[in-house]
Image: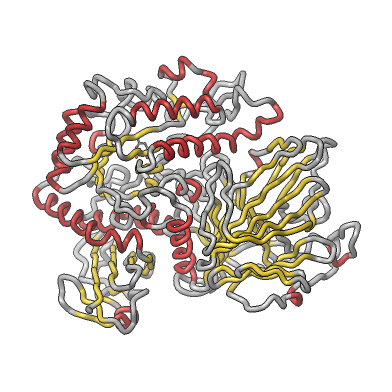
């Protein structure tokens, strides 16, 4: 049993992997948080429930000064009744008041985990997961708190269902997916801010006395912030210290609030961003929040990442491709941009076939009359003057070269200059009387309208049925503005951001139902919608439009804090790099791209013979090592910085018999040190042979004394070492 209820103490204890989580039903019916950390063996935790009267902290009418909601750590916090910290929920009644109070009413514990209609959610078999439903109520408005415990992972999934049992309509102004309180506050906050082409750089700072908010109001989870944060103990490093990671499975406007309060306690929350949200809930209607997942690690950031990776790979990604080796692809975007025709694509495909590449992906510009980014989004039919006769003859020729074929779409967007916009201006997000702002000269479709989703589904199916298309890249190249819908009444306008996300998820669901084997790569101007919500629908996401291998080190490092290597889209591109102008050795570009899904994004016909040989070698290595990278365990060994010139990471196979170590030195340090890396995750007593070298080392030696790196010859040198256990 991973969830126990101690009736005498009125305490719940949830055991997930090597972690435990506990809370108690207070005498007055509120639910106080007690503990979250390493695994415990008892529910005798009442001593952790402390009540102290505090000045200027009011108490509820049925309690005394010690009962103030302002002081006691909570499982889901009230609003307007004396807890001045960030509230979990606010529900406005027909009288206009939104004070929200909730007390324990009942609970239910069962094996398995229910799905959430219309939303992504983790899943597990009955023998793997157990769920607690804790019913709290504010009169006739109910809040069901869902806690699912993963028995073999330090993970608890949480979400909340709001049910209106009153006879009148209410409005949900806020419903966090979870609240996680701590009775102490000596933590660092770690999160992943960024920008286009500079996504998910790790930022870490000490909590201070304020509400620190990580959020998106852009309609998509965004490049700027990721729906994730971690609280880590000040001593936490990659390998030691405690880390609590919280991620939201959601791809739209989210907010995470982290508040260090007056008593140095911490309240944290994550959920739909309340600034751009409200939901009208009629009598007997229910609203389910997106799911949040909590991860505990006593092994620093590395342990936290590995738990997230295991969770996402085994209990979130559903794709047919989840455990399958993805085809090595070449994407024509950086090779041709909009300037291509069928013959040029065939030449790229021929070059690709000679080198062992397995799929050609045709990027933007194949539809409508699109020659640049000013037109045709929404017109998902072939641009005949570029591709005569449509896709079928092109794909046939590509297939004859023994390459699969993939295609780019940007389903949610429309150009003013398009047949779709001219026919259906009412399908665009807009506010009457206001001009529509543009982003990349395009407008956004109102995905809340079922007709729009149905139309897109039909249009995409028509293309997918016209030729054997085995992959699509699903892009979204702008953020939302003038978020208004022609179909929503005034009192539902603030539902639109969320309804947009639900519509986008529905289109994914429809496509997956119809094409279960279709490989979909998510994308939003690079990694602008790289979140756990998307991973429920797609097994991989384009990590960044910045393909510079050196920039990618930092982007992929940050991304790997919670997302597995198998989900990170990464390609080798041409040098000088199109985003940074930097030139990096070809080998290094391959090493960095191999930390993700691996492919090429350049004109292969422009490579010289030596480079072609490198490509052939890289592809052979990909086939040899991909099982370790995609399904193994990741150890981040070091990140280049002021005192350390090397960025290094290591993938170890599930049975620990193989390891692939990747190292890059971004800058050559004149007269610098002789570098080495210390490995992790090996069997100490096992002898490993270093490929291409013949020498054998004990795992213990490699982990303690490390591997020496060759002397650096130029900026951006990279090395890969493969180690295999000697039988
Ligand atoms: C976005 C993507 C790129 C490419 C272009 C095409 O920026 O991230 O990879 O597909 O759109 O317009």
Q: Is residue 430 left or right of residue 47?
A: left
Relative image position of residue 180 (x, y in whole percent): 65, 60
Q: Nearer the viewer, residue 683 or 72?
A: 683
- Residue 555 position, x and y percent, is 39, 54
Q: Position of residue 82 (x, y in %)?
A: 82, 55
**Residue drawn at (14%, 51%), measured in percent from left and top?**
611
* Occupied quadrant, residue 163: top right
Q: Residue at 44% of width from left, 29% of height from top?
A: 457
Q: How many numbered dots are placed on residues in this image?
A: 0
Residue 52: image quadrant is bottom right
Q: Is residue 558 visible?
A: no
Quarter residue 61 falls in:
bottom right
In this orientation, does residue 633 appear? yes
What's the image's color scheme? Answer: secondary structure
Question: Above or below — where is 77 with respect to 637?
Answer: above
Position above or below: 253 against 324: above
């Amino acid at each position: 049993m991973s969830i126990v209820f101690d009736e005498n103490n009125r305490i719940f204890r949830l055991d997930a992997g090597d972690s435990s989580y506990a809370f108690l039903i207070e005498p007055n019916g509120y639910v106080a948080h007690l503990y979250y950390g390493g695994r415990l063996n008892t529910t005798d935790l009442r001593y952790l429930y402390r009540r102290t009267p505090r000045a200027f902290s009011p108490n509820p009418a049925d309690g005394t000064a010690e009962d103030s909601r302002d002081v006691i750590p909570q499982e889901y916090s009230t609003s307007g009744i004396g807890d001045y910290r960030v509230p979990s929920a606010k529900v406005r009644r027909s009288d206009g008041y939104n004070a929200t109070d909730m007390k324990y009413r009942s609970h239910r514990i069962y094996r398995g985990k229910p799905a959430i209609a219309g939303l992504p959610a983790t899943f597990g078999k009955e023998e793997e997961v157990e769920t607690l439903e804790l019913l709290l109520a504010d009169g006739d408005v109910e809040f069901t708190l869902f806690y699912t415990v993963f028995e073999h992972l330090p993970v608890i999934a949480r979400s909340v269902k709001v049910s209106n049992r009153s006879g009148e309509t209410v409005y949900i102004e806020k419903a966090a997916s979870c609240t996680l309180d701590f009775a102490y506050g000596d933590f660092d906050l770690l999160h992943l801010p960024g920008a286009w082409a500079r996504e998910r750089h790790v930022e870490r700072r000490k909590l201070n006395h304020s509400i620190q908010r990580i959020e998106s109001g852009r309609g998509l989870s965004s490049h700027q912030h990721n729906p994730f944060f971690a609280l880590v103990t000040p001593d936490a490093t990659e390998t030691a210290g405690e880390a609590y990671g919280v991620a939201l499975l959601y791809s739209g406007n989210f907010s995470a609030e982290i508040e260090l309060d007056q008593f140095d306690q911490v309240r944290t929350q994550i959920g739909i961003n309340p600034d751009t949200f409200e939901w009208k809930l009629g009598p007997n209607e229910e609203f389910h929040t997106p799911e949040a997942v909590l991860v505990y690690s006593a092994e620093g950031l590395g342990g936290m990442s590995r738990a997230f990776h295991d969770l996402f790979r085994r209990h979130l990604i559903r794709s047919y491709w989840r455990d399958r080796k993805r085809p090595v692809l070449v994407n024509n975007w950086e090779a041709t941009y909009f300037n291509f025709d069928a013959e040029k694509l065939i030449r790229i495909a021929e070059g690709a076939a000679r080198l062992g590449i397995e799929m050609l992906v045709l990027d933007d510009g194949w539809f409508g009359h699109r020659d640049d980014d000013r037109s045709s989004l929404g017109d998902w039919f072939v641009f005949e003057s570029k591709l005569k006769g449509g896709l079928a003859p092109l794909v046939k020729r590509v297939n004859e070269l023994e390459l699969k074929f993939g295609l780019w779409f940007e389903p949610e967007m429309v150009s003013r200059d398009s047949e779709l916009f001219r026919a259906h201006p009412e399908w665009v997000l807009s506010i009457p009387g206001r001009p529509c702002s543009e982003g990349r000269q395009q407008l956004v479709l109102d995905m809340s309208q079922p007709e729009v989703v149905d139309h897109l589904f039909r249009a995409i199916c028509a293309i997918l049925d016209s030729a054997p298309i085995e992959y699509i890249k699903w892009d979204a190249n702008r953020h939302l503005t003038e978020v208004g819908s022609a179909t929503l009444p005034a009192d539902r306008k603030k539902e639109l951001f969320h309804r947009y996300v639900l519509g986008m998820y529905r289109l994914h669901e429809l496509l997956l139902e119809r094409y279960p084997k279709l490989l979909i790569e998510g994308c939003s101007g690079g990694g602008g919608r790289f979140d756990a919500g998307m991973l429920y629908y797609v097994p991989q996401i384009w990590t960044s439009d910045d393909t510079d291998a050196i920039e990618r080190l930092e982007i992929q490092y940050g991304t790997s804090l919670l997302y597995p290597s198998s989900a990170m889209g990464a390609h080798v591109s041409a040098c000088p790099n199109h985003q940074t102008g930097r030139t990096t050795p070809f080998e290094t570009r391959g090493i960095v791209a191999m930390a993700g899904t691996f492919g090429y994004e350049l004109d292969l016909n422009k490579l010289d013979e030596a480079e072609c040989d490198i490509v052939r070698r890289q592809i052979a290595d990909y086939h040899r090592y991909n099982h370790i990278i995609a399904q193994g365990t990741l150890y981040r060994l070091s990140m280049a910085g002021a005192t350390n010139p090397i960025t290094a990471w290591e993938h170890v196979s599930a049975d620990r018999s193989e390891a692939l170590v990747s190292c890059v030195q971004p800058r050559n340090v004149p007269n610098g040190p002789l570098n080495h890396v210390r490995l992790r995750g090996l069997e100490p007593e096992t002898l490993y042979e270093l490929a291409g070298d013949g020498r054998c080392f004990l795992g213990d030696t490699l982990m303690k004394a490390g591997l020496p790196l060759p002397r650096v010859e130029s900026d951006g040198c990279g090395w890969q070492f493969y180690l295999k256990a000697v039988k």
